[in-house]
Amino acid sequence: MWMQGVAAVAEKRARKSRAAARKGAEPLKGRLARRDELLTIVAHDLISPLTATVGLLHLLIRNEREGLSQRALLIVETLERSARGQLTLAENIQALSRALRGVLHPRRERQGAVELLREAARRAEETARAKGIELAVEGREGLDILVDREQTLLALDRLITNAIWFSARGTTVTLRAAVHGGKAALEVADAGAGMTPARARKAVGFMRRGGHAARDYTFGSEDEKGAGLGLAVCRELAEANGGDLRLLPGKEKGLAARLLFKKA
């Protein structure tokens, strides 16, 4: 009887503790949801002026290059690179916040893998040309996947941007469609500095270490700064479409970022 009384008291206290935990968790969940929604709004409001800034600076460089002194041209080119970096950051924050709130809602339809790579390369032409990078598309026709077109193109854009940042001028970034392990692979490969296998694992795990990550920036070949948000966006978009992201460091240099999906 005494033991039963102790057990009853312990169970009652446990129920109260669980109820208190649930009560405390609900406000926390609400605060986190409001935080993610606020990040989405702020990022959205930053994207429009940054897009305009990038566009105007690009036009200035393209149309007024001959009229600018060497020093002025250097300043304008630096401003354009900085604005592009800020725009990419805002887009990454917006996409990641939407992913964390579970509002991506992919519309998965049959897409040609090579066609997706061609379109991604077309959209990245200006960024590549500004740094003297060539984009090459390879792969077998007839390889189809079932994904949301725009979300997959966004993931590819983040991977291509990273590859351009970490590639030296005059090199090539290769976009490749292939089959690996029975799955369709959309791969973005560069010949840049690459990363160690340990750093590759850390990069893919960004935003899953206790819900946040320490500031751990990496720098491109011309001091472009990245904190891993782009890779986090790619992983979330891939998983929302039933896929996965793998980072494959080269033996000596370079990196291949591979999006894996089931074949349609």
Image (cartoon, helix red, strand yellow):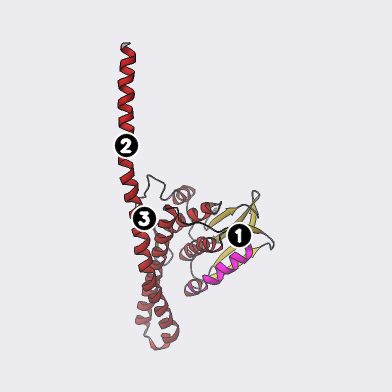
Q: Decide: is 246 above or below 142.
A: above
For the point 42% across and 47% down, the residue is 208
Which numbered tag is attached to residue 109? 1
Q: Depth check: 23 or 124 in front?
A: 23
Specify whether residue 11 is painted magenta: no
Q: CA distance from mark 2 to mark 1?
A: 42 Å
Q: Decide: is 73 above or below 179.
A: below
Label 3, on which residue?
A: 36
Indicate the amino acid at tag 2: Ala
Q: How many marks?
A: 3
Q: Residues within 10 Å of mark 1 (few under 14, many from 20)?
A: few
* Pointers 3 and 2 in contact (C-beta within 8 Å): no
Assign the magenta stretch its main secondary structure.
Answer: helix
Indicate the amino acid at tag 1: Glu
Which label sits in the foreground, 3 or 2? 2
Q: Position of residue 11 (x, y in %)?
A: 34, 24
- Label 3 sits on a secondary structure element that is helix
Q: Which residues are magenta?
A: 112-126
Q: Position of residue 212 (x, y in %)?
A: 36, 49
For the point 37% across and 64% down, the residue is 43
The quadrant the C terminus occupies is bottom right
Sequence-first disc among 3 and 2: 2
